[in-house]
Amino acid sequence: MLNVFLFRPERGRGAVVPLIFHKCIALSSQKLRMSAIFNFQSLLLAVLLLICTCTYVRAQAPSLLDRNKTGPLGLFWKAARIGERLSPYVSFACFMMGISILIA
């Protein structure tokens, strides 16, 4: 975070005291950042990164994801299966996401 330091003399002592104004004050007129849940592009990016990461982990250590096919951790196994079976589409989506990030 970028900080701006302003100095003013302290009353009665003549010393200089730094005042810190954070960048967030200057952001009030700019576009506010949104969470990945509420921004579709960020949500899509997070899902693509999850799929690609799980596919890579399953390729390197299959037993790590294969033992958790059900339950909450089964989401990672399912993401790895999506990455394996739909790899041309996932790679195309990653490519298009990269282009959209570079353009924006």
Image: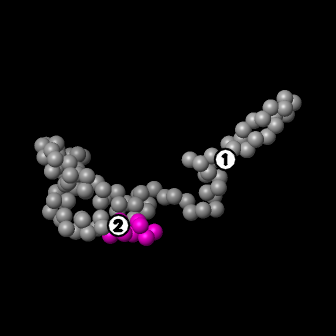
Residue 16 belongs to magenta span: no
Q: Earlier in the sequence, mark 1 or mark 2?
A: 1
Task: Point out residue 69 in the picture as x, y percentages from the top left corner.
Answer: 15, 48
Q: Of helix, strand and loop, which one carries label 1?
A: strand
- Give the alpha-carbon distance from disc 1 to disc 2, as whole Å: 35 Å
Residue neighbourhood size for the residue with mark 1, other residues' Cα within 10 Å, grouped as few (<14), some (14–19), many (≥20): few
Q: Which residue occupies 16% across, 47% down?
A: 60
Q: Of helix, strand and loop, which one carries label 2? A: helix
Q: Residue at x 45, y 69 (%)?
A: 104
The x and y percentages for residue 6 are: 73, 44
Q: Which mark is residue 104?
A: none
Residue wearing tag 1? 4
Residue type at mark 1: give it.
Val
Q: Is residue 75 visible?
A: no
| Display coloring | one colour
Q: Residue furthest right?
A: 12
* Viewer-nearest residue: 61 or 44: 61
Q: Quadrant location of residue 52?
A: bottom left
Q: Is residue 94 above or below residue 20?
A: below
Q: Nearer the viewer, mark 1 or mark 2?
A: 1
**Would you say residue 20 is visible in this rendering?**
yes
Magenta highlight on residue 97: yes
| Residue numbers of the magenta segment | 96-104
Q: Residue at x 22, y 55 (%)?
A: 79
Q: Residues within 10 Å of mark 2 (few under 14, many from 20)?
A: some
Q: Main secondary structure of the magenta part?
A: helix
* Residue occupying the point 69% across, 44% down: 5
Residue to which mark 2 is pinned: 97
Compared to 42, does 17 lie above or below?
Answer: above
Which amino acid type is shown beneath numbered disc 2? Met
**Residue 29 relative to residue 39: left or right:** right
Of residues 70 and 6, the one nearer the viewer is 6
